[in-house]
Structure formats: C-alpha cells, structure tokens
Amino acid sequence: MSRKSGIGHEASLKRKAEEKLESYRKKIHMKNQAEEEAAEQFRMRLKNKQDEMKLEGDLRRSQRACQQLDAQKNIQVPREAWYWLRLEEETEEDEEEKEQDEDEYKSEDLSVLEKLQILTSYLREEHLYCIWCGTAYEDKEDLSSNCPGPTSADHD
C-alpha cells in the first residue's frame, strides 16, 4: 500500500514540528525565568533579614549607649521606656509594669528603624554622641564637622 498525501502535507508536518519546538523553547524559557525570579526573591529576603538584624543590633547599641550616657547625667528614668535596654533578670511583677509603661508609649507602633532614628537623634542632640563613630563630641559644631551624618549609611 502506498501512502498518498496531498500537496503541502510535508510542509504542514514540518510547520507543526517547528511550532512544537518553539512551544517547548518558550516553556523552558519561562521555567528558567521563574527559577531566576525565585532565586532573586530568596536573595532579597535574605538581605532584608540581614538588614533587619543589623538595625536591631544598632538599636540595642543605641539603647545601651543611651542608658550609660543618661546615667552619667544622673537621669534615673529614660525619656521613653524603650530608650534603654530592658534587663533580662527582671521579676514578673516588674515585667508587667514595664509592659504597661510600654503600652503608654505605644512603642509597638514604631518600627525598629523608626526607633533607631528617634534614639540616634536623641543621642546626637542630648549627648552629642554618634553610635557609628563611637564618639561623644565636644559641641554641636564638633559633631557636625567631624561626624559624617546621622545614619549608618553615612558612615560606610
């Protein structure tokens, strides 16, 4: 039995094969793009986590510095409860009082970055101190001329 096919049948088969190949290439391209996007999102999440941890570390350093500098000026109570580090060995009773104090200040409404900005501003104005320089300056003139600025990025 001989196979008969009409004129253009082979061209049609060839076109269909090319379409399948093109479709396959598109699928592979889209899969690769999705994998690249997923990897980029992972890198961004990792960077954001590292940035967040750095901010939290800077905030703790600021709180520690604030507590020490306030103590040197005989300041017994922080301007805001969260300006100082909380002692881990507090009793439960003290803990409940602290939580009530914090509720009054609404410190939970502030992000770590906002707290850091507020506290570093307080340290600069009240104590002429920069946590990134690790220096207490003589006066506002000394601070403004010798400290690169009020943020971590200014000190990179």
Image (cartoon, grey):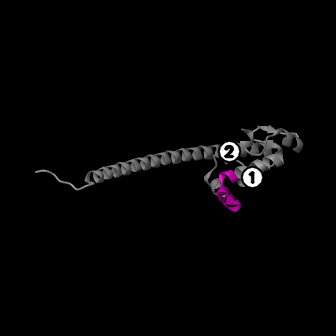
Amino acid at dot 2:
Arg
On the rendered structure, is 102 left or right of 40?
right
Q: Nearer the viewer, residue 129 or 42?
A: 42
Q: Residue at x 79, y 40 (%)?
A: 148
Can you identify the residue that label 2 sits on?
Answer: 60
SS at badge 2: helix
Please state the horizontal and vertical placement of residue 87, each as a whole percent of the image. Answer: 66, 46
Residue 24 in view in this figure = yes
**Residue drawn 69% across the image and 59% down it:** 101
Q: Residues within 10 Å of mark 2 (few under 14, many from 20)?
A: some
Q: Nearer the viewer, residue 150 or 105?
A: 150
The local secondary structure at tag 1 comes to helix
Q: Earlier in the sequence, mark 2 or mark 1?
A: 2
Q: Farthest residue toward the left?
A: 1
**Residue 100: image tag:** none
| Residue numbers of the magenta segment | 98-114
Residue 53 percent location from the top left of the image: 61, 44
Does the magenta portion include 59?
no
Q: Is residue 3 left or right of residue 8?
A: left
Residue 154 lies, in percent from the top left, at 75, 42
Q: Which residue is mark 1?
A: 118
